[in-house]
Amino acid sequence: GENVEQHPSTLSVQEGDSAVIKCTYSDSASNYFPWYKQELGKGPQLIIDIRSNVGEKKDQRIAVTLNKTAKHFSLHITETQPEDSAVYFCAASSGNQGGKLIFGQGTELSVKP
Amino acid sequence: GAVVSQHPSRVICKSGTSVKIECRSLDFQATTMFWYRQFPKQSLMLMATSNEGSKATYEQGVEKDKFLINHASLTLSTLTVTSAHPEDSSFYICSVPDRSSNEQYFGPGTRLTVT
């Protein structure tokens, strides 16, 4: 089955710097790669996603890149702000798994003012 | 996207009792819902897929007789933790998938504490 590895587990940056979180997946059939932000005691919120027919997607300060050949995808946050501090999860799913998401281990991002 | 609610948000129960958690899709008809469990400082682990009008499908290692799932309508799925023990204390989260886009919309979660 699918396995998703996420690095780093913790990331501390200064306000205004960029943050990059990387994930690799194992199942070449995976075709949907969302990123979620989870604040303490809350459910995950979708912040951006990418599909296998696209190499890069950007939404304001957030971007995601996908390398299908290498089976890895990354989240890039520019001009970080303290409110970006949270746990970020990557995930992968394929259409032949009924929409099941397999999550990475999570990255705790801390943005210091 | 879909709006998903869970009830209760927090529950404390005594060991040996059963607890029911509700997941509602407020604006989206869901033939499928997913139930996840999340221990502190860990990732979300899929427990089971709730199917409207049929039996739930459970992930390997999840006891179906302990975690009873009922998907009574297109907007409601319930998870009942039977004979709860302290090790069942966790954050339980449901999600509603949009099959046309593959997106999943998560509920706010239910914090279960078993004493």
Image (spheres, coloured by chain):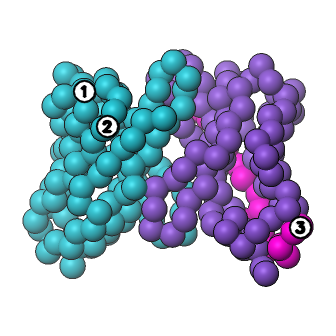
Chain colours: A purple, B cyan
Q: Which residue lies furthest to the front in this view?
A: A60
Q: Mark 1 lies on which chain?
A: B
According to the image, label 1 marks what residue? B74
Three-letter residue code for mark 2: Ser
Residue ID at (28%, 45%) = B23
Q: Do the residues labelled 2 and 1 touch (CB within 8 Å)?
A: yes
According to the image, label 2 marks what residue? B25
**Secondary element at image label 2:** strand
**Residue A96 location, x and y as percent?**
54, 18
Question: Would you identify the image quadrant in which residue A2 lies?
Answer: top right
> Which residues fall within the magenta stretch?
A1-17
Screen quadrant of the N terminus of chain A: top right
Q: Give the distance between the C-alpha atoms of the residues marked 2 and 1, in whole angstroms.
A: 8 Å
Q: Relative to A103, is A98 above or below?
A: above
Residue ID at (21%, 32%) = B71
Closest to the observer: A102 or A110? Answer: A110
- Identify the mark at residue A17; answer none if there is no mark: 3
> Could you tell whether A53 is left or right of A32 in the image?
right
Q: Relative to A67, is A60 above or below?
A: below
Q: Do the residues labelled 3 and 2 touch (CB within 8 Å)?
A: no
Question: Would you identify the image quadrant in which residue B57 lies?
Answer: top left
Asked whether the viewer can see residue A18, the reply is yes
**Residue A49 location, x and y as percent?**
68, 36
Residue ID at (76%, 68%) = A81
**Secondary element at image label 1:** loop
Q: Mark 2 lies on which chain?
A: B
Question: Would you identify the image quadrant in which residue A14 lies?
Answer: bottom right
**Residue A13 location, x and y as percent?**
83, 73
